[in-house]
Image (spheres, rainbow, N blue to C red):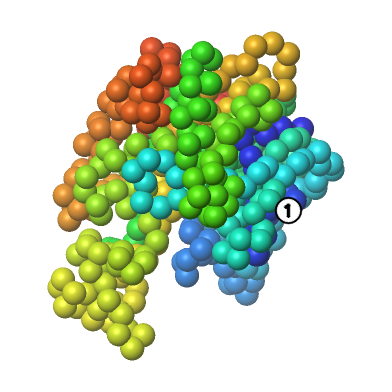
């Protein structure tokens, strides 16, 4: 695989920095997409970050085989299809990923502060001391790696997961504009049989929904070439290198001809957030972290009503106590926005600018007071609106070719498999 970045790649280490590519960051993205695909096909995929993650008990596994069940049947009894490929406690990953070469540079760290935003967005590693800002904005350039499966039957499956990841989001911080890549590799149509997946298990009433690809949406948004200078000029007023620069008003003039991307994602995310006046809904969709002014959410009441006394949580709204497992202290954004990027940056010819939006709209808890159809309708109508895009970038002429925006809502997972990870119409 030969890969080139269109927006910066972020694969952080244990310190939260991104100095080089981490194989675990790539593998984690492939796993995330496979989990969403399996659930969309009606199968079960565990949440590896929870206490419900899979674990293989060898004694139980051996006894199952001795009782006449096949290896596959014995595996299905204990671990989900995703863990069977990517590994879990007691079962190793069934492929290797080896980096061959890297021709990567450090992207600049950027603080983005769109107008009317309450807080700045850190596009990269933020060091509170102010001493480690330079070149902490991810990686740009090209790299090469090998994927070596133990079983040739997994080649097509890994290929379609790579296709999804490269096209829409590889690595971390894809909700902040990172992780859109390009490759000359032509993947085969998916030939992996995913028709007999283990069915979902009964979940706790208050368990949060997990990504299912049939609940996803995908957008390709073409940007008018003549509007690039205008967009860059406007957003540069909200770009800074350090917090000190931000306080002094010393903004960063972005040179869009030197990079494959324009750090524009925070402006689009801000506009999408403003579409939803319901605070709980907005936090549920766009993500939040509990702070002094933002309390954790009680998953029974669906309000920011949790307080903590003597290490115990209780709800101010319903007065219920001992609810440690019914709180939501933070959640990641379910809507991801790429930076604007030049898809011809590594080719000869004129620049061609576009951006991507994607994400998933899960079932909305009834106590929030808004249903999924309303959420979808608001998003659909605005993403093709001239006013939305003019207001997003603060310009008088619409910078987006709205007539040629391409979108897919609720894709057919079986069709994604047949097309090797490509989305029909995009």
Which of these two is toward me, 184 or 118? 118
For the point 73% across and 53% down, the residue is 19
Percent coordinates x, y for residue 394 in the rendering? 37, 28
For the point 60% across and 71% down, the residue is 57
Which of these two is toward me, 120 or 103? 120
Task: Report which residue position mark 1 lands on.
Answer: 19
Above or below residue 361? Residue 305 is below
Number of numbered callouts drawn: 1
- Is residue 220 something one can see in this rendering? no
Residue at the far right: name it.
Answer: 100
Residue at the far front: name it.
Answer: 248
Above or below residue 422? Residue 198 is below
- Is residue 79 something one can see in this rendering? yes
For the point 18% across and 74% down, the residue is 316
Percent coordinates x, y for residue 76 in the rendering? 54, 57
Percent coordinates x, y for residue 128 in the rendering? 57, 64
């Amino acid at each position: 695989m030969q890969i080139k970045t269109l927006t910066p790649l972020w694969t952080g280490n244990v310190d939260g920095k991104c100095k080089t590519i981490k194989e675990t960051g790539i593998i984690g993205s492939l796993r995330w997409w496979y989990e969403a695909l399996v659930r969309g096909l009606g199968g079960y995929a565990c949440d590896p970050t929870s206490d419900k993650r899979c674990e293989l008990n060898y004694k139980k596994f051996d006894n199952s085989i001795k009782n006449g069940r096949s290896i596959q049947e014995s595996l299905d009894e204990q671990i989900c299809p995703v863990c069977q490929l990517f590994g879990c406690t007691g079962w190793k990953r069934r492929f290797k990923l080896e980096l061959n070469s890297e021709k990567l540079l450090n992207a600049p760290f950027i603080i983005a502060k769109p107008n009317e935003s309450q807080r700045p967005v850190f596009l990269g590693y933020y060091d509170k001391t102010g001493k480690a800002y330079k070149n902490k904005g991810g990686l740009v350039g090209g790299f090469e790696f090998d994927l070596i499966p133990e079983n040739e039957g997994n080649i097509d499956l890994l290929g379609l997961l790579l296709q999804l990841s490269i096209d829409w989001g590889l690595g971390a911080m894809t909700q902040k504009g990172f992780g859109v890549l390009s490759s000359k590799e032509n993947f085969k149509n998916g030939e992996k049989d995913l028709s007999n997946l283990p069915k979902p298990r009964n979940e706790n009433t208050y368990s949060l929904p997990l990504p299912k690809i049939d609940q996803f949406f995908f957008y390709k948004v073409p940007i008018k070439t003549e509007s690039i200078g205008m967009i860059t000029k406007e957003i540069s007023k909200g770009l800074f290198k350090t917090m000190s620069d931000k306080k002094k008003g010393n903004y960063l003039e972005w040179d869009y001809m030197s990079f494959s991307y324009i750090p524009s994602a925070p402006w689009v995310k801000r506009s999408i957030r403003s579409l939803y006046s319901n605070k709980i809904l907005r936090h549920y969709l766009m993500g939040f972290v509990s702070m002094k002014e933002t309390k954790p959410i009680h998953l029974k009441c669906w309000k920011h009503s949790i307080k903590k006394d003597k290490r115990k949580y209780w709800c101010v709204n319903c007065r219920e106590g001992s609810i440690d497992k019914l709180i939501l202290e933070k959640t990641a954004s379910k809507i991801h926005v790429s930076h604007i990027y030049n898809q011809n940056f590594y080719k000869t010819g004129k620049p061609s600018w576009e951006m991507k939006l994607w994400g998933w709209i899960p079932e909305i808890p009834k106590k929030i007071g808004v249903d999924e159809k309303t959420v979808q309708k608001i998003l659909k109508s605005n993403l093709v609106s001239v006013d939305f895009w003019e207001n997003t970038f603060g310009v008088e002429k619409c910078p987006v070719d709205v007539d040629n925006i391409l979108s897919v809502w609720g894709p057919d997972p079986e069709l994604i498999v047949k097309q090797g990870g490509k989305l029909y119409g995009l």
